[in-house]
Image (tube, helix red, strand yellow):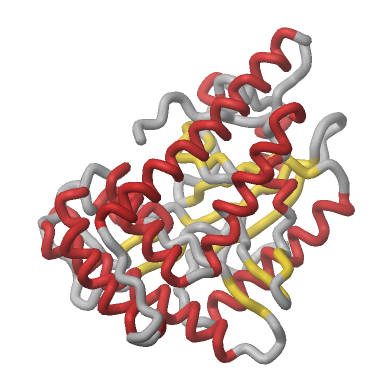
Amino acid sequence: MATDTITFDYDFLVDFEAGIDPLDPEHSKIPAQVLGYGEMSTVMTIDGGSPNLVYKRMPMFHDNAELEPFLALYDTYLQQMTAAGINVVPAAITSITPHSGNIVVYIIQEKLDGHTLANQAIHTLPAADVERVFEAILEQIGRVFAYNAAQKNGIELGLDAQMSNWAIANYNPDQGQLPDPVQLIYLDTSTPLMQVHGVHQLDPELVLRSAPSFLLPLIRLLFVDDVMNRYYVRRQVVIDVLGNLYKEKREDVIPTLIERANTFLEPEAGSDEFQPVTEEEVLGYYREDARIWSIYLSSRRLDRQLHRLLGKPYPYVLPGHIDR
């Protein structure tokens, strides 16, 4: 299952997966370099693979009964996002069934210059240009929610609009200025957020698969209620983008961006019901979000240690320290 715009060597990918060391990907049989981590995936380049591709590895599928709905959802989500007017990075999706262990899904995407990623670009951009990037993200958020409102079939798209999920098209950091207009490319296709008549189509258990079983009730409560649902609420999506700016060390721009966010949100809410976003709310949200992800990642590290003590293979690649 793949798009027409991405080609890749499946046999090479099978060979890579057969020799991967999740504890140390750089020293796998075929070495890989980790570029980043998503909720469900590890983003890598692979030595000997195409230098123009990145590989998102997701090893959490027990069987075809879990795999097939995800593959169908992935295709549907990309089609719906494109229909909503979102420019999604070209990608392909495939699966590998090893001799033992979980089925592994790979999403293969066009490799973009890391300097064009919005969360990297804003580290060096002046405040006025960070505001322009934020304005462009608000436009994308508006497109998705306008699309949702127009649907008659119960389909509702979720959107994780954080800076790290966007690339700035035609941006050359060496020139020191943003293109005009700022056009964005959406990268986070490995978490296909979609509801039909209010029912999540992405099984939350897939996201939680790597957490230790004895902590699942707590993590399940925190994740589903406090994380997955937020991406279907316009105000929460905007607050999530703002809160992430603390992690990106650009809290200097937050007051100005909050003013712009409230201008964006007020017409939809209506003056009688509108609750302006405040700096205190954004900071509180950021701290709570960091707490949730800290608990989740700590539990995964604990589970990895338990696997090692019991002599069991651990299939997931985990990040080191994350500065939040």
Residue in the image at 62% along x and 88% along y? 151
Residue in the image at 40% along x and 31% along y? 322
| Residue 62 located left or right of residue 295 | right
Q: Position of residue 222 (x, y in %)?
A: 60, 45
| Residue 97 located left or right of residue 303 | right
**Is 14 placed above or below 204 here?**
above
**Is 254 placed above or below 88 here?**
above
Image quadrant assignment for residue 321? top left
Q: Look at the image and tell me in which quarter the N terminus lies.
A: bottom right
Image quadrant assignment for residue 23? top right
Q: Is residue 148 visible?
A: yes
| Residue 293 located left or right of residue 217 | left
| Residue 180 located left or right of residue 243 | left
In the foreground, 172 or 133: 133
Q: Is residue 40 visible?
A: no
Residue in the image at 72% along x and 77% along y? 197
In the foreground, 208 or 167: 208
Q: Look at the image and tell me in which quarter the C terminus lies.
A: top left
Residue in the image at 73% along x and 65% along y? 201
Q: Give the tally of numbered discs.
A: 0
Q: Position of residue 155 (x, y in %)?
A: 67, 79
Q: Position of residue 34 (x, y in %)?
A: 48, 34
Q: Position of residue 215 (x, y in %)?
A: 69, 30
